[in-house]
Image (tube, grey):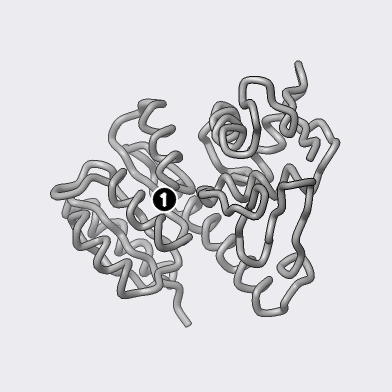
Amino acid sequence: MKEKILVVEDDPTLQETLAYNLKRQGYEVTTTEDGKSAIELAGKTKFDLIVLDIMLPVLDGFDVCRIIRKESNVPILMLTARDDEIDRVIGLEMGADDYLTKPFSMREFLARVKAQMRRVRFDREDVEIGTPVEKETLVFGDLSIDLSRHEVRIQEKPLNLKPKEFELMVYLANHRGQALSRDLILERVWGWDFTGGSRTVDVHIRWLREKIEKNPAEPSRIITVRGAGYRFEG
C-alpha cells in the first residue's frame, strides 16, 4: 500500500513540483492550497505525512498545525520562506516535527520526507508486533508514563503534552540518572537530519518543566548539568 502525503502549498508551481517528485518516489499525493481545506482533508483521510507551508490563505500554517495536532500525531513537515528562529520555535510549539526554509533543494526535501517516513514505519512495526515497550508504564513517584496510550500523568491527572514533548519525556525517563548532552537528545528525539539546533531541546525542556515540576524555576525532576546537558531524576 502506498504511503499517503498531503501537500499544503499555495504557490502552484512549487505545489506541482513537490507533488511530481513525491509521486516519482512512489508516494500517493493529495494537494491543496489553503489551510481550511487542509484541515478538512486531514480529518477525512489518514495521511502518513503532511507537508505544510506557513504562509497560506484563510488559515496560516501555524493554525493548521495546531488544529490538526489536537486530533492526530501525523508527522508534519513545515515549509517557510522566512529563515527566522522565532518561526521555527513557534512551529515546533504548535507540534511540527521538522522545519524546512525556502529555497531548498529537492534532494534535501526528499531526504526530510524519507526520514519522517522511516519513523512512521518503525512506529507501525512496533504496533504490529506488539513490542513489550508499547505495553509498559514507567512510574516515578506521582509521575507515570503510559507508553501504549502515549500519556503522561501527575497524580493520575493526564498532562497535555505535544508529540515531541512526549517523545522527549520517554527518552529522558529511559535514561534516568544519566547526563545527556543537547546534541545527543536532539539526535535521538528529533533525528540526525534535523537542523533546528540545540535551542530546540532547551525550549522543549522548559515546556516539560512547566508541566511536571512543582517549581519549574527550581526543577527537581529534570536537572540541568552544567557543561553537559540534562539529567532526569524521576
**Vertical placement of residue 83 versus 16, above or below:** above
Q: Which quadrant of the figure contains the C terminus?
A: top right
- Of residues 213 and 17, which is closer to you in this image? 213
Q: Quadrant of residue 50?
A: bottom left
Quick check: 94 above or below 29? above
Q: Residue at x 75, y 61 (%)?
A: 137
Q: Residues within 10 Å of mark 1 (few under 14, many from 20)?
A: many
Q: Secondary structure at mark 1?
A: strand
Query: x, y (%) of residue 158?
Result: 58, 54
Task: Give 4 or 39, whichever is nearer the viewer.
Answer: 39
Pick out the residue farthest to the right.
177
Image coords of residue 19 (percent x, y): 30, 63
Relative horizontal placement of residue 57, taking residue 102 as reference (left or right)? left
Q: Is residue 101 left or right of residue 117?
A: left
User: Residue at coordinates 30% horizontally, 64% vertically from top-left?
Assistant: 20
Query: Is residue 18 rendered to the left or right of residue 26?
Result: left
Residue at 74% in and 29% down: 220
Q: Label 1 amino acid?
A: Leu
